[in-house]
Structures are given as structure tokens and as C-alpha cells.
Image (cartoon, helix red, strand yellow):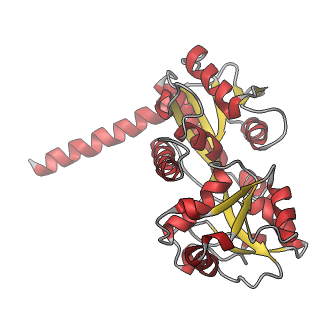
Amino acid sequence: MFVTATRGLIAATVLGVSAFAAQAQDFTPENPECIAPANPGGGWDFTCRQVGKELQDLGLIDKTMQVVNLAGGGGGVAFAEVVNKRADDNDLIVAASSATATRLAQGAYPGNTTDQVRWLASIGADYGVIAVSADSEIETLPQLLDMIKSDPRSVSVAGGSAVGGWDHLKVLIAASAYGIEDVRSVKYVAFDGGGEAVTQLLAGSVQAFTGDASEAKGFVDSGDIKVIAVLAPERLEGDFADFPTAKEQGVDAIGANWRGFYAPGGMSDAAYDAWVKKIGDLYASDEWKEIMANNGLAPLDLQGADFQQFVQNSVSEIQDISREIGIIK
């Protein structure tokens, strides 16, 4: 009986996988479109245009991907457009990132929630870093965090996002992981972009910088700053390999500015499965690995249900920290 049942289960699983593959293979977008929720230039625009081009070059779509820039509300205008007007559009995907999750977590898209859309897949991540000026006496992340623990007013950390934004949250994730119970004690100074934050670091106005690996690399190469921690699960490759992780220093903090896509909540299962497979095939290609290396993107290989769970977990973590610092109630 057990053998028969097991065989039946295996057969059902094989049939299910076959049905999934056939379903995904059957769907082809007639007019593929990607919404970049910002003006031309920047991460979301790059995500749409580069992925659209490579999907066509690799033969994963047979028509040119139309890219529509729909700026406003930090991605909120695009999110509302998809939820309210294009909820069943099978040809549409939308660029997203950690900023999307942060704003959803903090209620910055009024009336909208994570579960109103379907999360497709990631295409890589730009991991967070914590850095100090090259001539700083601080050499490790625990050394910096111990200074904050003993005298929070003695350390200011600069970043290129607003209070409660992603740069701010990265250093709070590290502080929380290190056992700093009241993360509100971490003194964060917001600047208009990472470049200005680094300028203030070099001027001695602040003691540390929080940003992304890709934006920090140029300042490391010029000899201006030193990265004391990358918020990645393991050391990055290539030019980033010399940066120590927070984890190897005993601080279990991960801060990935992931890039990926969501789709309308009413997209059919066939279309959803097909888009998940197409983006997964793109991610696995040698061509995409080269694009990642050239643009400072680190591996983050999540598709379908795994990506959906990842986003939900990210939103939950951001909500917890945002409550601690009074961004949300």
C-alpha cells in the first residue's frame, strides 16, 4: 500500500511539474511591457531596460519590451496604477527593489499592501556597506558598534536616504543584530545621495557612512574610505572580495538592496509561471552574469514562491525596525 501510494505521489508530482512547464511554455506575452516607477536613469529604469533587452536577445520574448517610466510617490503611483487599473494584465511586469519593500512596510503607498501584487523574481542585489574614512582609527564593525553602545552621541552615521529610508535601516539592522536594544540611539544624518554623505564623512562632520557596495567602490578605489563591513551572507567576488562581511565579524546582519519584479495581482497562473521561468532563465545565463559583474550586482537567485516569501519577510523586518524608531505605529 505504501509503495503504491508513494508511486502515485511521485507520478502526481511529475505530472504537476510537467503541467507547470507546459503551462509556462504555452504563454507568450503579446505586448511585453515593463513599468519603471521613476524617471529615466537610476535603478528601476536600468532594471526594466537591461532585462527587457536581454530577454529579447536571449530569445525569451519575441517582441521588444516597451519600457514606461511612471514616476511619483517613490513608486507609489506605479503601484496604484497596477493595482487599480491593470490588475489582470498578463503582459506587464514592474521593476522593484528594497525601496519598494521599505515603502510598503512603512505605509507610504496609502491603501496598498504587499499581497495586492504577485512577486516574480529577483535579478541580483547590491549589498549594503558600512564604511569609515581611510584615516579613521576604526577598523572593524564591532569597534564602531561598541562606540555607539558606550556613547551614542559620539558617533554620527551618514547616508543618502531620508530618516527611515533604506540607508538608515541598514545600519539599524546591524545595530540590532549586535544587541543594541534601543536602535533609536543610533545617530543617523540624512543627505541627498551617497556622494554628499561621503563628502561629509571626509570633512569629519560624521564618523561613518552607510550605503551600497557599488556606490562605495569608487571612494575605496580613490583611497578616501575603507569598508569595515558588507551586509552580505558571504564575501562578494571580484573587486569587492577584500571587503569583510558583518557576519564574519560576529554581527549576523544582512542588508541587500535587491532588484527584481512584481506583476499584477490578477495575472493568470500561466502568465505568472511563464514570467517566473523567463526571468529565471535570464538570471542563469552567462550574459546576465557578465552584466551583474559590470554593474556591481551580487547574486540573489530567487523566483516565484521563494521570492514572494523573501519580500514578505523583508517587509516584516522593516516594519519591526520602523516601529522601534517611530516611523510607524
Q: Residue at x 46, y 47 (%)?
A: 316
Residue 35 image-quadrant placement: top right
- Relative to 298, residue 24 above or below: above
Residue 261 visible somewhere in the drawing: yes
Q: Is residue 280 visible?
A: no
Residue 206 image position (x, y, % from top left): 77, 68
Kindly identify the residue that appears in the image at 68 percent across and 73 percent down.
154
Total number of numbered discs in the rendering: 0
Q: Position of residue 92 (x, y in %)?
A: 64, 25
Which residue occupies the extreme left position in the image?
1
Residue 309 picture location, percent across and down: 45, 45
Q: Is residue 43 left or right of residue 92?
A: right
**136 or 9, which lies in front?**
136
Q: Residue at 73%, 63% (x, y): give it.
A: 213
The answer to whether 151 is drawn above or below residue 311 in the figure is: below
Position of 30 relative to 232 (above/below): above
Query: Residue 93, position in %: x, y?
Result: 64, 30
